[in-house]
Amino acid sequence: MTALQYDVFVTPAIAQSNGTLTLPNGDPMVWSPIATTLIYGEHDAVLVDPPFTTDTTRDVLAWVEKTGRDITEIYVTHGHGDHWLGAPVLLERFPDAVVRATAGTKVHMDATTLESRAEFWDALFPGRIPTAPVTVQVVGKEGLSLEGNALIPVEVGHSDSDDTTVLWVPSLKLAVTGDVVYNGTHLAISESANGGRDAWRCALDQVEALGPEVVVASHKDPASPDSPADIGRTRRYLDDVDRQLESSTTPMEFFEKMTRLHPERINQGVLWFGALALLGDDVAQ
Ligand SMILES: [Zn+2]
């Protein structure tokens, strides 16, 4: 059994090309930085959560190539397109690599391909996302195997969307947490109504119970370490969301309170999007 290693590449915030929504102060919307994790042995590697534009995934590919390892599998933590739409760029270079996700995640990936891709992803980032189809193979509880080491998908239910997972690497005490844990960026709370934040806290408990020493959040401040302390910080942010929603009547009021409480977190745009989803006129909380 090879002793595994891991490395994390953070794609910087990505500017949207299109879209009518801006921040209240008129600033354009950007996509939060995206962390891609490479877990590797002597020859092979498993890559978790590629980004979504062609250019940024090419940067990830160049980083992988420097390690000299071959990607054998690409694991996708959950269905949101920013965690896998760039996969064709990697598959072109590593045609034998298999894209793997749990059955729950695959349903959402398939739905993205069929429904939201044109109206959301290609509308906001026209011409910038690979168009080749991505074939996904379901991985069960047995998980993936990398040079004799187990990599276990843990289904934690709803976090920033439904049917989300983390990839647990026992030999490294490494939890690659997708969007269950956030590190130094505002959280995507737009899907958190109707008990979503309680479910999310439950997902955080499940990550904590693994006893990880390294916690990689898919959306992170590039300067911040990959620390288990972000489990608690994410929980406190959700608690703040609950409290501030209760005392706010407009998206703006909520947004201002949350940015005052969390001035250090990057990408206020994702918070503004959530504020509109939770307190906007046409969507019930
Ligand atoms: Zn997500």
Image (cartoon, rainbow, N blue to C red):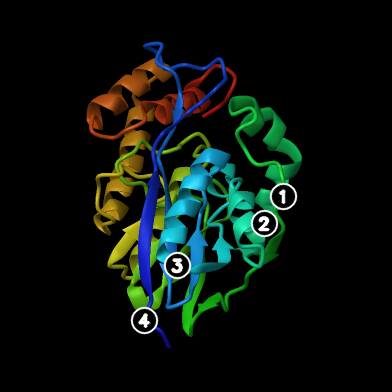
Query: Looking at the rendered structure, which numbered label has been put on residue 110?
Result: 1
Q: Residues within 10 Å of mark 3 (few under 14, many from 20)?
A: few
Q: In whole angstroms, how far apart are the C-alphas of marks 1 and 4?
A: 35 Å
Residue 262 image offset from top left, x and y in percent: 25, 32
Disc 2 to disc 1, how far (Cα)? 6 Å
The answer to whether residue 206 of the structure is visible from this angle is: no
Q: Position of residue 251 (x, y in %)?
A: 43, 19
Rounded to the nearest angstrom, the CA distance separating label 2 from label 3 is 29 Å
Q: Amino acid at mark 1?
A: Asp
Name the residue: 46% across, 16% down.
22
Image mark for residue 48: none
Residue position for label 4: 3
Of the residues shown, which amino acid type is indicated by label 4?
Ala
Residue at which label 3 appears: 68
Is 181 above or below relative to 255?
below
- Left or right: 160 as drawn, with respect to 96: left
Image spot of residue 134 (x, y percent): 70, 53
Could you tell which of marks 1 and 3 lies nearer the N-terminus? Answer: 3
Q: Residue at x 73, y 49 (%)?
A: 133
Within 10 Å of disc 2 (Cα), the crowding (few <14, some 14-19, many 20+) is many
- State which mark lies toward you, 2 or 4: 4
> Mark 3: which secondary structure?
loop
Q: Residue furthest bottom?
A: 1
Vertical arrangement, residue 251 with respect to residue 31, above or below: above
Note whether ligand 1 is within 8 Å of mark 3. Answer: no
User: Is residue 9 among what the camera can see?
Assistant: yes
Disc 2, SS: helix
How many badges with numbers are in the image? 4
Name the amino acid, label 2.
Answer: Lys
> Of 206 and 173, which appears nearest the observer?
173
Determine the CA span between mark 2 and mark 4: 30 Å
Q: At 47% across and 76% down in the image, what residue appears?
A: 43
